[in-house]
Image (spheres, rainbow, N blue to C red):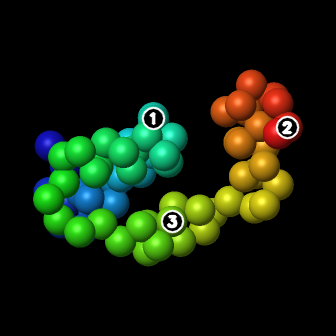
């Protein structure tokens, strides 16, 4: 068994896993359903999207829309 994660690290990894699996919009919808704590969307968005280039974001958006550019 590995070392126990801090609460901040556990929260970060859980949000990342939800975002990777569900996408950012549905991950936020899920968190809103189960969370009673305030959620700092701006902070999360800055952390989540900081590793993307604009080109990567556009590609991901197009892929999620089935290649449609609307």
Q: Secondary structure at mark 2?
A: loop
Q: Nearer the viewer, mark 3 or mark 2?
A: 2
With respect to residue 38, does 21 lie above or below?
above
Viewer can see residue 19: yes
- Residue farthest to the front? 70
Viewer can see residue 14: no
Q: Position of residue 21 (x, y in %)?
A: 45, 35
In the picture, measured across the screen, residue 9 lies left or right of residue 45, that is left
Earlier in the chain: of badge 3 and badge 2, it is 3
In the picture, measured across the screen, residue 56 lies left or right of residue 39, that is right
- Residue farthest to the top? 66
Q: Quadrant of residue 67?
A: top right
Q: Quadrant of the N terminus?
A: top left
In the picture, measured across the screen, residue 59 lies left or right of residue 49, that is right
| Residue underneath mark 1 | 21
Per the model, the C-alpha gap separating discs 1 and 3 is 16 Å
Q: Tell me whether circle 3 and circle 2 mark residues in contact (CB < 8 Å).
A: no
Q: Secondary structure at mark 1?
A: helix
Earlier in the chain: of badge 1 and badge 3, it is 1
Q: Position of residue 28 (x, y in %)?
A: 39, 50
Q: Secondary structure at mark 3?
A: helix
- Taking the spot 78% from the left edge, 43% from the top edge, the residue there is 59
| Residue underneath mark 2 | 69
Q: Quadrant of residue 41?
A: bottom left
- Taking the spot 51% from the left edge, 65% from the top edge, the residue there is 45
- Taking the spot 78% from the left edge, 49% from the top edge, the residue there is 58
Q: Nearer the viewer, mark 1 or mark 3?
A: 3
Q: Nearer the viewer, mark 2 or mark 1?
A: 2
Badge number at residue 45: 3
- 44 and 34: which is toward the camera: 34
Earlier in the chain: of badge 2 and badge 1, it is 1
């Amino acid at each position: 068994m590995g070392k126990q994660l801090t609460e901040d690290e556990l929260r970060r990894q859980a949000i990342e896993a939800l975002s990777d699996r569900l996408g950012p919009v549905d991950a936020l919808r899920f968190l809103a359903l189960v969370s009673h704590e305030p959620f700092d969307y701006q902070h999360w968005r800055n952390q989540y999207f900081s590793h993307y280039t604009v080109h990567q974001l556009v590609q991901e958006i197009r892929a999620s829309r089935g290649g449609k550019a609307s």
